[in-house]
Image (tube, rainbow, N blue to C red):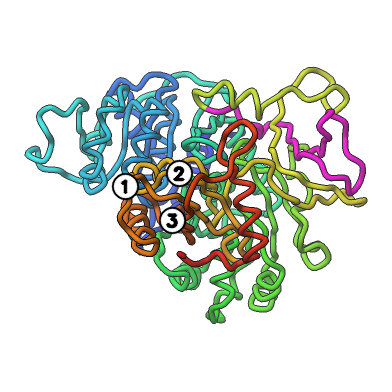
C-alpha cells in the first residue's frame, strides 16, 4: 500500500529495507528499522499519557534523533505535532504552547529550566517529556504538569494509535504574519505526504541520496527534508551549525547529495572556498524562502558545475508551491518557475479573473497541498483560504489558498515574484511580524510609540528597522536610549528578529486616516533617504 499517513513514510521503508540508514548525526546512524520502532514505541508512550485524537504535542529541541522521533510519534498516535523553532525565547515558546493548546511538550532538561514562568498561561498542558534525566529536586512541587523521562515512555507497551485518515490534521507549523503574534498553519497528513511525493519527484530523489537538514525543522522547507527523504528511503544528516563553514564541512563529511537552504545562507556559502570533494557527490542544490541573487547563483554554479540548481517558492499555508527546472536557471534566474507536480498555481485579479501574460496578480494555489487553515483563527482562515472564483479551474466549489503575494506569468507560463501585499518582513529566511517586534519594544517601557518594518537588503532580504519615540520621563540622550533598547531586545528576541537600525524621533509618529501608526509612510521616508542596504546599522 502506498503511504497515505505521515508516519507511513517511515514504516513502509522500514518494511522494505530496515537496515538502510535513515538519520545520521554526530557520527551516529539510526536505520529505518530502529527509527520505525522508536516512533511506534514513543507513540505508545504518548497514548499512555492520555493523548487524545488530534491532541497537540509540542517539540522544542534542536535537531537530533529525538526531535524527528517525537514529531512522527505524535502523528502515529493520532495526535498533532507542533515543532517549535529552537532559537525562540521562552516568551515566544509560551505563546505557541498556549495558542496551540499543547497537551504534551517534548524538550530537554536545559530548555525546560527556562520555561518556569510560562506554564501558568498554558492551561491545557498536562505532560512534559524530557530527553534526559532530571533530579526530582529540580521539579517544583506545585508544578501543574507531570514530568516524564524519554526512556520511560519508550518502554511503554506499543499499540495502534487513534484511527485517523489522510484528511485529518497532523501538524501545526507556526509562522509570523503582518499582524500579531505567530499564527499556526494546520496541515493534514494528505498535505505532507502529497508534498513529500511531489518534491521527491521533481528533485528526482532516490534511496542513495543524502540530504543535509540545515534549515530548522519548524520551517515547512526544513521539515520537508525529512519527508522527502523518507518518501524514497534516503538518509538525512541532521546539522545544528554555528558558522556557514560548518555546513561545508558537514557536506564533505557526510557526502551530501542534496542541500536546500535560504538566500542568506547561500550568499555566505558562495563566498567561501569549497572543498573540491563536495562537487563530486552534490547532485543538486535548492533555494527557498526568497529570491537568490543572480551573482550568488552564478558563483554557486561556478563552484558546482555538475550540481543541478533548483529555485523554489513555497507557502507554509500550502506546504510547497513552485519550482524552476534546472535547465531554465541560466535563462530565467529571476523566475520562481511553475507549479510543482500535483498542484495548480493561478494568477488572479481582484475580481477573480485570470491575469493576462505579464499582468500582475495574486498567486493562488489549489490542490492536495492546500492546508486546512490557521489554527484557532477562523477570521484569518476566511481571509486567506477562500473558494475559487467560478471558472478559475474547479468544476465544483473548492477552497484554495490566496497567498497575498503579487506575481506575473510570462508568455511561456513561468512565474515571477513581484512583492507581498502585507507588511510581513522576510529576513534571513524568516517571516517576522512587525506587530510582534513592536509589542516587545513596548514591553521594554523605554519607548512611547514605535513602528517596525523592513527595508530591502541584498543579503538578508529585508533588514529590520524600528522608529521610536522616547517614553515619558526619558532621561537618556538618543544614543544611550538606543543602546538600552537594543540591550532589552537581545534579551527578549531571537537574533533574527533584532532591529538592524533604531531611529529616535520626537513627537508623534505619522498616522493613517484611521488613526494607526503609518508604517508605510515611515518605511517610504527612510527608503527615499537611505536606499537599499544602508539600513544595516543601529543608529
Foreground residue among 20 and 151: 151
- At mark 3, the secondary structure is loop
Residue drawn at x 51%, y 46% as measured from the top left: 451
Locate residue 410, reporting x and y percent.
88, 51
Q: Nearer the viewer, residue 253 or 93?
A: 93
How crowded pointer 1 is (Cα within 10 Å; few <14, some 14-19, many 20+) is rated as few
The residue singled out by tag 3 in the image is 498
Q: Earlier in the sequence, mark 2 or mark 1?
A: 2
Left or right of 500 on screen, residue 188: right
Of the residues under marks 3 and 1, which one precedes in the sequence? 1
Residue 402 position, x and y percent, is 71, 33
Toward the viewer: 390 or 118?
118
Q: Which residue is mark 2?
A: 449
From the viewer's perspective, is residue 84 above or below residue 243?
above
The alpha-carbon separation of the residues under discs 3 and 1 comes to 25 Å
Q: Residues within 10 Å of mark 2 (few under 14, many from 20)?
A: many
| Cα separation between marks 2 and 1 | 14 Å
- Residues tagged 3 and 1 counted as in contact (Cβ below 8 A): no
Residue 57 percent location from the top left of the image: 38, 31
Quickly name the residue at label 1: 473
In percent of the image, x 11 and y 41: which residue is there? 138
Residues at discs 3 and 2 in contact (Cβ within 8 Å): no
First in residue order: circle 3 vs circle 2 = 2
Say left or right for 136 vs 191: left
Q: Position of residue 214 (x, y in %)?
A: 48, 58
Residue positioned 17% across, 44% down in the render: 133
Q: Which residues are magenta?
A: 345-374
Magenta stretch encompasses residue 420: no
Q: Nearer the viewer, mark 2 or mark 1?
A: 1
Above or below, comparing residue 357 to residue 267 in the picture:
above
Eye-nearest disc, 3 or 1: 1
Amino acid at each position: 500500500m502506498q503511504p497515505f499517513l505521515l508516519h507511513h513514510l517511515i514504516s513502509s521503508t522500514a518494511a522494505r529495507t530496515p537496515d538502510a540508514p535513515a538519520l545520521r548525526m554526530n557520527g551516529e546512524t539510526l536505520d529505518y528499522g530502529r527509527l520505525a520502532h522508536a516512533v511506534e514505541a514513543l507513540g505508545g508512550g504518548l497514548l499512555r499519557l492520555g493523548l487524545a485524537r488530534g491532541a497537540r504535542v509540542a517539540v522544542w529541541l534542536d535537531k537530533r534523533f529525538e526531535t524527528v522521533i517525537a514529531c512522527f510519534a505524535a502523528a502515529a498516535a493520532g495526535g498533532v505535532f507542533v515543532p517549535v523553532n529552537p532559537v525562540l525565547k521562552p516568551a515566544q515558546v509560551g505563546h505557541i504552547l498556549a495558542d496551540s493548546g499543547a497537551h504534551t511538550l517534548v524538550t530537554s532538561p536545559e530548555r525546560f529550566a527556562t520555561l518556569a514562568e510560562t506554564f501558568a498561561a498554558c492551561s491545557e498542558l498536562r505532560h512534559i517529556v524530557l530527553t534526559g534525566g532530571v533530579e526530582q529536586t529540580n521539579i517544583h512541587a506545585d508544578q501543574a504538569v507531570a514530568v516524564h523521562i524519554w526512556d520511560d515512555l519508550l518502554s511503554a507497551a506499543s499499540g495502534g494509535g487513534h484511527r485517523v485518515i489522510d484528511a485529518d490534521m497532523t501538524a501545526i507549523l507556526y509562522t509570523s504574519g503582518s499582524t500579531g503574534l505567530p499564527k499556526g498553519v494546520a496541515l493534514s497528513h494528505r498535505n505532507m505526504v502529497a508534498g513529500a511525493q511531489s518534491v521527491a519527484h521533481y528533485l528526482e530523489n532516490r534511496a542513495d541520496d543524502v540530504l543535509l537538514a540545515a534549515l530548522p525543522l519548524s520551517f515547512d522547507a526544513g521539515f520537508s527534508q525529512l519527508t522527502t527523504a523518507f518518501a524514497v528511503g534516503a538518509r538525512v544528516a541532521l546539522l545544528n551549525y554555528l558558522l556557514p563553514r560548518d555546513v561545508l564541512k558537514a557536506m564533505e563529511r557526510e557526502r551530501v547529495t542534496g542541500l536546500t537552504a535560504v538566500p542568506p545562507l547561500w550568499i555566505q556559502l558562495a563566498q567561501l572556498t569549497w572543498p573540491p570533494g563536495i562537487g563530486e557527490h552534490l547532485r543538486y542544490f535548492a533555494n527557498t524562502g526568497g529570491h537568490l541573487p543572480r551573482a550568488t547563483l552564478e558563483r554557486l554554479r561556478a563552484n558546482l558545475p555538475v550540481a543541478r540548481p533548483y529555485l523554489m517558492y513555497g507557502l507554509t499555508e500550502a506546504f510547497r508551491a513552485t519550482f524552476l527546472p534546472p535547465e531554465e536557471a541560466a535563462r530565467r534566474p529571476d523566475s520562481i518557475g511553475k507549479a510543482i507536480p500535483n498542484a495548480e498555481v493561478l494568477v488572479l485579479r481582484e475580481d477573480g479573473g485570470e491575469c493576462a501574460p505579464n499582468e500582475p496578480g495574486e498567486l493562488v494555489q489549489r490542490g492536495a497541498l492546500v492546508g486546512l487553515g490557521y489554527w484557532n483563527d477562523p477570521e484569518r482562515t476566511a481571509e486567506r483560504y477562500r473558494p475559487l472564483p467560478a471558472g478559475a479551474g474547479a468544476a465544483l466549489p473548492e477552497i484554495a489558498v490566496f497567498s497575498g503575494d503579487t506575481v506575473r506569468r510570462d508568455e511561456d507560463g513561468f512565474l515571477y515574484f513581484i512583492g507581498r501585499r502585507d507588511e510581513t518582513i522576510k529576513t534571513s529566511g524568516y517571516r517576522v511580524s512587525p506587530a510582534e517586534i513592536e509589542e516587545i519594544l513596548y514591553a521594554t517601557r523605554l519607548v512611547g510609540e514605535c513602528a517596525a518594518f523592513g527595508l530591502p537588503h541584498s543579503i538578508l532580504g529585508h533588514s529590520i528597522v524600528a522608529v521610536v519615540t522616547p517614553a515619558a520621563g526619558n532621561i537618556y540622550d538618543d544614543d544611550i536610549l538606543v543602546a538600552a533598547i537594543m540591550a532589552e531586545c537581545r534579551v527578549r528576541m531571537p537574533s533574527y528578529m533584532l532591529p538592524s537600525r533604531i531611529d529616535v524621533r520626537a513627537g508623534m509618529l505619522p498616522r493613517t486616516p484611521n488613526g494607526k501608526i503609518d508604517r508605510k509612510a515611515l518605511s517610504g521616508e527612510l527608503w527615499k533617504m537611505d536606499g537599499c542596504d544602508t539600513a544595516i546599522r543601529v543608529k
